[in-house]
Image (cartoon, rainbow, N blue to C red):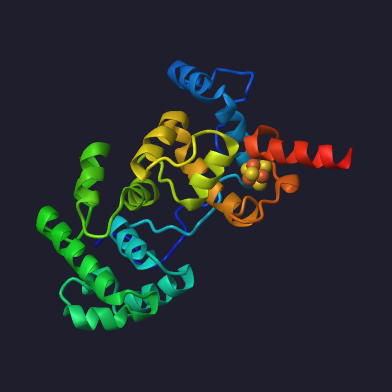
Amino acid sequence: MHGSSNRSRRSPQKMLMIPSREGNEDRAPNEIQRANDDCGGRIYAILEALHNQYLEADLGNLENPVDELVYISLSRQTHYQNASRSWKAVIKIGGPGRLVDMEEDELADLLKPSGFSRQKARWIKRSLEIIRDRMGILSLDGAEIWSDDELEHFLQSLPGISIKSAKCIMLYSMGRQVLPVDTHVRRIATRVGLVQEGLSEHAIHLALEDVVPPRHRYSFHVNCIWHGRHICTALHPRCSNCILQELCDLGQCIRHVATGAAA
Ligand code: SF4
């Protein structure tokens, strides 16, 4: 395996080149046209507002795609603290490279803190075996020359890896400009009005990738997760404190209701 097996920062927070709403010099013409067609150009205002607030939120993602794959598998259907406990146990025995040749029962014991440990042990062991068989080594370095479609198709063929998980590995650890849609991204995108409600997992990935320009997908994704955890929460969104309220369909509705009630 290459790289570190520690759960480390992907990169320091950094300033992004977000184009101004007035100036077109940093926008490819097709990006401007698409954004204008699909959501009235609002996407650039949303990107800018999120960037001004958070730069690029650091979610502590892993640099090594095999590490990220194992961590994402551990994170399914559990709180991140439980996944972290299992991840620490994996690191303690030498990292994901040690898991592939373990007995499934032994691996399930190791992964107990993350829950569903039998299923996760089976998924992780099989995924690592498939990667080693395909690449000749337990590494995804050789996949760097693959196209996005080829890479996504391969990752989704691994047990327990959904569309979102495949895109997370690609975005966080392989520098691909894809857009994973998790619960926070979905909630904010629908409330703001970038996509309609109730889309399937496949459809919402297509719809949002059509709206968010490729080079802004990483910042949009991590900033939506941060914003969704702290401001636009599922049950009690803090619209009056939200930097997106002027741009948000639901936020505007809530404001009008509040204004009407006060009048
Ligand atoms: S205005 Fe309210 S609903 Fe809209 S993004 Fe902000 S917190 Fe969420």
Q: Residue at x 76, y 39 (%)?
A: 257
165 vs 183, left or right, is left
Total labels drawn: 0
For the N terminus, the quadrant is bottom left
In the image, residue 224 above or below residue 72: above
For the C terminus, the quadrant is top right
The location of residue 24, given as percent across then percent down, is 56, 17
The location of residue 22, given as percent across then percent down, is 64, 18
Ligand 1 in which quarter: top right
Q: Which corner quadrant of the image does residue 25 belong to?
A: top right
Q: Which corner quadrant of the image does residue 247 belong to?
A: top right
In the image, residue 83 above or below residue 142: below
Q: Residue at x 37, y 56 (%)?
A: 63
In the image, residue 68 above or below residue 254: below
Q: Residue at x 36, y 61 (%)?
A: 72
The location of residue 119, given as percent across then percent down, is 25, 71
Q: Is residue 177 visible?
A: no
Q: Residue at x 14, y 59 (%)?
A: 130
The location of residue 139, given as percent across then percent down, is 21, 57
Query: Hey, which residue is sitting farthest right in the picture?
Result: 263
